[in-house]
Image (cartoon, rainbow, N blue to C red):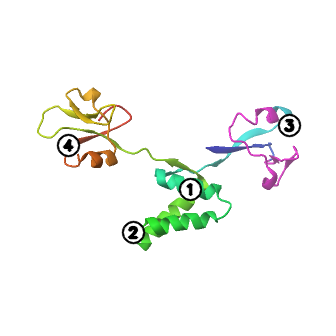
Amino acid sequence: MSLYIIEDDDGLVLGDCMEFETNMVNAILYDEPSEPEGDVKEYGGHVVKLVESPAKIVVSEAEAKMLKKAKDTTVWRPAAVISDYAYNTAKDSDQEALLEDRLMRAYVIGWTVEKPKRWNVKVPHTKDVWYYKSWDKDLLTISDKELCSEFTEAEIEHYGLQDCEKEEVTDDGND
């Protein structure tokens, strides 16, 4: 996402007092390039792309839950919540520092939750037979790959399918 300002031909920016000035601190910022069109018509100048926002940090569901807690807390400092999470999650001090850094950046820049990988799981010692979950969560088999279930890593462990052949499911429909 980018930010936009209105600038005149002399390089002055439209400020919050609706006058062109040299002080960028008072510049009006717009999130979309179409937002300032009314102000350009009224005050003149042209739209200028100012800043390219950094990409959001990809985090796990657990990390997202913790970051939300850090944003919503009025009791703890956000840095303390993140630091505590990194301390309790990382295996060693190097991992802790890297995790804390990534989570701090996510807190400031913004985050998006990663989608867990999903797998189609093949029945061992068969040519084209796949597992699927019935409505009551029983594990059944089917020969039509289009009807097989997608399993997360946790489900694969739950059903004891770790040694089975599996194919990662992608969003584009190609396995």
Name which quarter of the figure residue 136 lies in: top left
Report helix, strand or loop for mark 2: loop
Magenta residues (range): 11-40
Callout 4, which amino acid? Glu
Question: What's the residue type where badge 1 is placed?
Answer: Leu
Q: Amino acid at mark 2?
A: Lys
Q: Main secondary structure of the magenta part?
A: loop
* Residue at horizontal 60 percent and vertical 65 percent from the top: 79
Marks 4/3: CA–CA distance: 66 Å
Query: x%, y% of residue 123?
Result: 18, 38
**Quick check: marks 4 and 3 in contact, CB under 8 Å?**
no
Which label's residue is closer to the chain start, 4 or 3?
3
Please tell me whether mark 4 sits on a helix, a strand or a loop. Answer: loop
The residue that appears at 28% across and 49% down in the rendered structure is: 157
User: In screen coordinates, is 91 left or right of 19?
Assistant: left
Which part of the image, by quadrant, shows the C terminus?
A: top left
The residue where tag 3 is placed is 43
Specify the amino acid type for callout 3. Answer: Tyr
**Is-magenta flag for residue 37?**
yes
